[in-house]
Image (tube, helix red, strand yellow):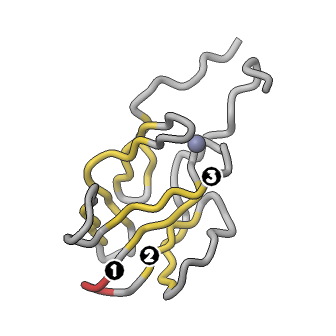
């Protein structure tokens, strides 16, 4: 692993897609909502840090941890609270499809 090369971080998601199965996201810029409307169960997406792992956020009240998802009229997603990946350590908020990183970006030289 070459730590001198910063991973490519996604700054925003471009699309929100409704899916009804656990399909793997095809693009790092897609947010997949599993189950539509009020019965949405999961939000799945490729980690925006570029590590390639798939993150799944639970929306169901019967399971913990649980996230709250809001969709605006332009079909942009806001997720609360922040997402902290246990595999790569990425920590960020998703607000109106924008990725707001909690940790500073790797400084460029
Ligand atoms: Zn990652």
Residue 100: image x %, image y %?
A: 41, 41
Mark 1, other Cα within 10 Å: few <14 / some 14–19 / many ≥20: some
Of residues 61 and 6, which is closer to you in this image? 61
Mark 3 Cβ and ligand 1 under 8 Å apart: yes
Identify the residue shown where x is 68% and y is 34%.
Answer: 7
Residue neighbourhood size for the residue with mark 2, other residues' Cα within 10 Å, grouped as few (<14), some (14–19), many (≥20): many
Q: Between residues 93 and 64, which one lies in front from this camera angle?
A: 64
Which residue sits at x=38%, y=46%?
Answer: 83
Mark positioned earlier in the residue sequence (1 or 2): 2
Question: Residue lying farthest left?
Answer: 61
Q: CA distance from mark 1 to mark 3?
A: 21 Å
Quarter holding ligand 1: top right
Q: What is the C-alpha distance between the residues marked 1 and 2?
A: 7 Å
Report helix, strand or loop for mark 1. Answer: loop
Q: Is residue 53 above or below residue 63?
A: above
Q: Give coordinates of residue 107: x percent, y percent.
A: 60, 16
Q: Of marks 3 and 2, which one's residue comes earlier in the chain?
A: 2
Task: State the residue in front, 56 or 62.
Answer: 62
Q: Position of residue 53 (x, y in %)?
A: 62, 52
The residue at which mark 2 appears reads as: 33
| Cα–Cα gap, marks 3 and 2 | 17 Å
Identify residue for label 1: 40
Residue drawn at x 66%, y 44% as measured from the top left:
50
Outermost residue, front side: 63
Image position of 44 (left or right of 92): right
Q: Is residue 40 above or below residue 5?
A: below
Q: Which residue is mark 3?
A: 53
């Amino acid at each position: 692993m070459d730590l001198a090369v910063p991973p490519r971080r996604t700054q925003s998601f471009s699309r929100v897609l409704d899916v009804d199965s656990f399909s793997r996201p095809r693009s790092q810029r897609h947010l997949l909502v599993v189950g539509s409307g009020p019965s949405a169960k999961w939000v799945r997406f490729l980690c925006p840090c570029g590590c390639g792992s798939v993150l799944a956020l639970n929306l169901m009240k019967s399971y913990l941890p649980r996230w709250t998802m809001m969709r605006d009229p332009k079909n942009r997603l806001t997720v609360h609270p922040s997402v902290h990946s246990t595999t790569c350590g990425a920590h960020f908020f998703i607000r109106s499809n924008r990725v707001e990183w909690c940790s500073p970006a790797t400084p460029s030289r």
